[in-house]
Image (tube, helix red, strand yellow):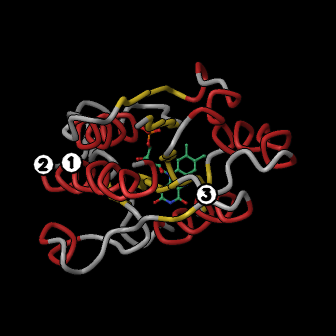
Amino acid sequence: MEIYVVYDSEAGHTEALANAIAEGAKSAADANVHLHHVSEADPRDLADMDAIIWGCPGHFGTISSGLKAWIDKLGPLWARGQLVGKVGAAFCTTATVHGGIEMTLWNLITPMLHNGMIIVGLPGNVLENVLYGSYYGVGVTCPVEVSEDAPMNMPTDSDLALGRVLGRRVADITRKFVS
Ligand SMILES: Cc1cc2nc3c(=O)[nH]c(=O)nc-3n(C[C@H](O)[C@H](O)[C@H](O)COP(=O)(O)O)c2cc1C
């Protein structure tokens, strides 16, 4: 099965989470995972995918303009119904816990629904999620550094574990549709 992971990221926080999601998806032996920064991703490639996972930093409570501009190139695929029935999932990073994680995840999911995709979140029986996560995908907080000299606050091991679980879950659910 073909799984596409596309992300926007300015300083690498969301990229680290995207890497963990791709790693989780790749842990399924039958998954062929395509991981791309949005600047090098071709929307036309989505037609050949079985599952699509996209994510970005939350910018003012919603999708970053970089990823939104890319999503807005999906009109021709939408018009031909080429994404209908594909599995989708979303992820994001923000700087604060109450800085719009859920709104950003919902805004990422909305265009998937408009394209007829089947959304996969994380349920409460996933251990990593019940302790810490979100039901709408993976949204994690990387707090702003206390000073310019401080090391960057990247996603924690728990954050990355959630990412791996989402990637694997997408692969396991997609398999039920493609086999
Ligand atoms: C223009 C802009 C708007 C942002 N808006 C928010 C916000 O509304 N809430 C929040 O918690 N963080 C906000 N942030 C912080 C980023 O979401 C956060 O630092 C994120 O982890 C950056 O990920 P990246 O390194 O992958 O770009 C904003 C950052 C920028 C540049």
In the image, 70 versus 76, the foreground residue is 76
103 sits left or right of 171 in the view = right
- Which residue is label 3 attached to? 85
Residue 109 visible at all: yes
In the depicted structure, whether residue 60 falls above or below residue 157: below
Task: Give the mark, 3 or 1, whose residue is nearer the N terminus.
Answer: 3
Q: Residues within 10 Å of mark 2 (few under 14, many from 20)?
A: few
Residue at the location (38% across, 32% down)?
12
SS state under label 2: helix
Residue at the location (51% across, 55% down)?
88
- Label 2 and label 1: CA atoms lie apart by 5 Å
In the image, 127 versus 26, the foreground residue is 26
Could you say which quadrant of the image residue 44 lies in? top right
The residue under label 1 is which amino acid type?
A: Leu
Label 3 vs label 1, nearer the camera: 3
In the depicted structure, whether residue 88 falls above or below residue 5: below
Q: Residues within 10 Å of mark 1 (few under 14, many from 20)?
A: many
Could you say which quadrant of the image residue 118 lies in? bottom right
SS state under label 1: helix
Residue 56 visible at all: no
The residue under label 2 is which amino acid type?
A: Asp
Q: What number is the disc on residue 149?
A: none
- Which residue is label 2 attached to? 157
Q: What number is the disc on residue 160?
A: 1
Give the x, y percent position of residue 161.
17, 52
Task: Give the mark, 3 or 2, whose residue is nearer the N terminus.
Answer: 3
Residue at the location (29% across, 57% down)?
169
- Label 3 and label 2: CA atoms lie apart by 33 Å
Quarter placement of the N terminus:
top left
95 sits left or right of 83 in the view = left
Give the x, y percent position of residue 84.
68, 55
